[in-house]
Amino acid sequence: RLYNEFAWSYDLAAWIVSAGRWDRWRRMALDYVGQQPALEVGFGTGHLLAAMAESGWPAVGVDLSPAMQRQAAARMRRRGLAVSCVQGRAQGLPFAGASFGSVVSTFPAEYIVDPASLAEFHRVLKPGGRLIVAGLIVTLETDCAWWNRINRRAFGEPAADPLERVVQRCADAGLAAQVLWREDAPWRVPIILAEKRS
């Protein structure tokens, strides 16, 4: 519902759950954008898409939610930006093959690592193009015993490498992936960086 009826509250909710760090974490993805133009998948309220456009990068966005489309369009109008925002699914992107040098997604849901989505990213990327996914999970590094006990009770024991499956799925789709960890103490934000092999 946060992506539809309550889209107007998305930015506030993101700010609260990240203790005000959401924008900083989101912008980490921009450090890895290589070739252009860039496609942002799941652009939400349009902050990163606007940042790319304001930097002079040719960028296009795709998002399934009509409510997010409206939020992003309003942001672009307020900033005087002409950015193409398309409604669509990651598993069936409405773009020609080899259209983009970079595909970017920040804090996405599990659809981003659906094999059908990864196959589409491979299709629309130029040879040597990159998929950049920031914040599929965010971890809190702390030695606080009571906090760790609560987390284990709520979520179980953490996997040794929760992103190993993602790297393998990328490889299966023809994307050579690595996970880079960015520190924002006490938080750690993973960046999945995957390059199209051919």
Image (spheres, rainbow, N blue to C red):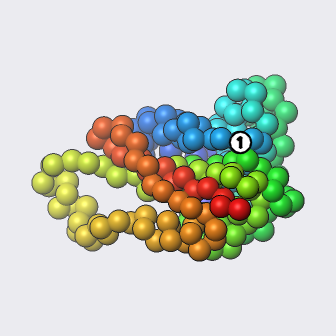
Give the percent coordinates (x, y) of residue 87: 80, 56
Q: Left or right of 64: which side holds 193?
A: left
Question: In front: 85, or 100?
Answer: 100
At label 1, counting other C-alpha atoms closer than 10 Å, the crowd grade (few under 14, some 14-19, many 20 or more) is: some
In this orientation, does residue 41 appear? Answer: yes
State the residue at coordinates (76%, 54%). 126
Instruction: Name the residue: 79% across, 36% down.
Output: 58
Could you tell me residue 161's position as x and y percent? 35, 65
Instruction: Give x and y (percent) for residue 184.
Output: 36, 37
Q: Is residue 103 visible?
A: no
The residue sitting at 40% across, 42% down in the picture is: 182
Task: Please tell me whether residue 49 is drawn above or below residue 114 in the rendered image.
Answer: above
**Where's the N terminus, which quadrant?**
bottom right
- The part of the image, by quadrant, that contains residue 112 is bottom right
Quadrant of residue 194 within the rendered picture: bottom right
Q: Name, please, the residue furthest toward the front.
A: 198
Quarter that holds the C terminus: bottom right
Residue type highlighted by circle 1: Gln
Residue at the far left in the pictured view: 145
Give the total of numbered labels. Answer: 1
Secondary structure beneath dot 1 equals loop
Q: Is residue 66 above or below residue 52?
A: below
The picture places residue 120, in percent across and down from the top left corner, at 73, 66
User: Measuring 68% from the left and 52% from the top, which residue is drawn there?
Assistant: 128
Q: Which residue is mark 1?
A: 35
Left or right of 15? Residue 194 is: right
Depth check, front residue: 90 or 36: 36
